[in-house]
Image (cartoon, grey):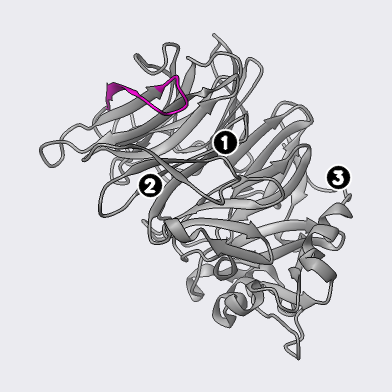
Amino acid sequence: MRLAALASLVVLLGARSVAAHEGRFPETQQLLFDGDTLVGVATTVGLMVPSDEGWRWTCRSGIGLREQEDPIWALAEGRFVVASFDGIVLGDPCSFAYVPALQRQVVLDVHRASNGRFFAVTSNGSGPNALWSSDDGETWTAGVTLPLPTLFERVRTAPSNPDVVYLSGFEPPEEFGGVRDAVIWASTDGGATFEERRLTLEAGEVTLFLLEVDATNPSRLFARTLRDLAARSIYERVLESDDAGATWSTRFEVPLFGAFARRGTTTYVGGRDPGEPPPVPGAPPRELGLWRAEDGADFTHVFADGQVKCLNARDDGLFACLGGASPFVVGRSNDDGASFASVLAWSDVTGPVTCDVDAPTPTRCVPEEDGHNREHFGLLDAGVDGGVGSGGGGCSTTSHPGGLGWLLGLLAFRRTRRGRTLG
C-alpha cells in the first residue's frame, strides 16, 4: 500500500529531468522530533539529519530499505524505529539493523504511545499480527492475531490514555469491484482485547487510515480515506468520530490528501497536486496546499504555494513537508499556515553523515544510488573523496570515538534560516 511507484512521475529539479535517471525523486515525507528538536527528516532517498555543517544524508541502502517503499518512522530514546517491508529497523544514521525476530515480516505501521510503549501491525504469509514492545523496539511480543482477510494498516493510541488502542484497515469485497468495508478495532485494555466497528466506504475508496486520536478525548478519532488511483473523479475525505469509531462523519474533502495535524481546537489538512482534473462533472479541482479550520467551522484554503505532504503542529510553529513550486522542502509557519520559512532545502544537504570508520552504513550505500541522488542534490562531490576511509554513497567516515559523530553534529546544530519564505 505504501509503494510510491504506482504511477509514473516526470518532475523537474532545477534544470535536470528525473526521467533521465534511475532511482527515487527526492521528496520529504515525515518529520521526526525529539522533544523540541527536529532530529531527522525521512525522505524518498533516505534520512536527513542536522549537523553543525548543515544537513547530512544517510541513503536508503544504509538503512536497509527497498527503493520503492515508503516506511513509517518513529523515535525511541536516542534512535530511530522504522517499519519496513522486511521487518523493524532500529538504529542511528551510522548504524541501522533489523530486529532479528521480525525479519522478512511486512511491517505496515509502527507507533509510539505516550507512555513509551511501541505498537506495530504486520502482515505476512501466515496472517497479520498486532505487536507491542516495552524496550524501545528491541524485543516484540505478539498480541492478538488479526483476522483474515482484513488487512490492518494503522495503529494509534490515545495521548491521554495509552491503554486505548485503535487499529484500522479494510476488508476486500466479495466481488471484484465491489464496495469495501473499513474495519476499526478498539481496545481499552492496552490491546489485550478489541471490539470491532465497521464503516462502508464509498465507491472508488480503497481503505481508511487512522490519523490520530484527540489529545484529551480518547473516544475522538480522525481518519482519512484513500481513493483508487483510477478514481480521479472523487475526493479523498477526512473523517471524524466522537464515539470511538462506531460512527463517522465527513469533516472535509480534499482533491488529493497530503497531511493532517491538530493543535488545540485547530485542524490542518495538507493537499498534494492531483494533476489536471478529468473531464467529469463534479470532479475535484486542481487544488493543493493547506486548509485550516477551528472545531465546528468550515475549512479555509490558507496556503496554495506548494504541495503539503506532512505536517507537525507544535507550540513553536507549524512544520510541513513541502513540494512542487516551493524552493525548500521543509518549512515552518508562525502565522497558522499562511506562509512558511525554510527549515530544509536540498541545497542545505552538505554531504553524507559523518560516521566512525567501522560503522556499517558506509559499505551499504551503493555507488549507483549515491551518484543518482548526489546529482539531484547538486552534491557531485558530497564531501567524499573516494580515498582510503571514504564511505561513498550517503555516509563518509571519520574517527570520532564511540560512534557519536552524527550526534555531536546534531547537538551543535543551532542554525536558523530566515532568508526564504513562501506565502
Disc 2 secondary structure class: strand
Tell me the distance, in whole angstroms, between the alpha carbons under discs 3 and 2: 42 Å
Q: Earlier in the sequence, mark 3 or mark 2?
A: 2
Residue lying at the far top in this picture: please name it. 296
**Counting residues from the N terminus, which is met first, the one under dot 1 or under dot 2?**
1
Q: Which residue is mark 3?
A: 418
Residue 379: x percent and y percent?
72, 73
Locate residue 368: give its quadrant: bottom right
The answer to if 136 sits in the magenta stretch is: no
Residue under the point 85% across and 59% down: 408
Expressed as whole percent of the image width and height from the top left, the position of residue 93 reads 68, 62
* Mark 2 neighbour density, 10 Å: few (under 14) some (14–19) many (20 or more): many
Q: Residues within 10 Å of mark 3 (few under 14, many from 20)?
A: few
Q: Where are the magenta residues, as a range?
A: 187-201
The Cα atoms of the two marked residues, 1 and 3, are separated by 37 Å
The residue wearing badge 2 is: 122
State the separation of the CA atoms marked 1 and 2: 17 Å
Residue 231 placement (x, y as % from top left): 29, 40
Q: Secondary structure at mark 3?
A: loop
The circle on residue 117 is 1
Q: In front here: 157 or 302?
A: 157
Q: Quadrant of residue 293?
A: top right
Q: In the picture provided, is 339 more to the left or to the right than 210?
A: right
Q: Closer to us: mark 3 or mark 2?
A: 2
Residue 23 drawn at (x, y percent): 50, 70
Q: Is residue 193 magenta?
A: yes
Which quadrant holds the C terminus? top right
Q: Residue at x 46, y 65 (%)?
A: 66
Circle 1 SS class: loop
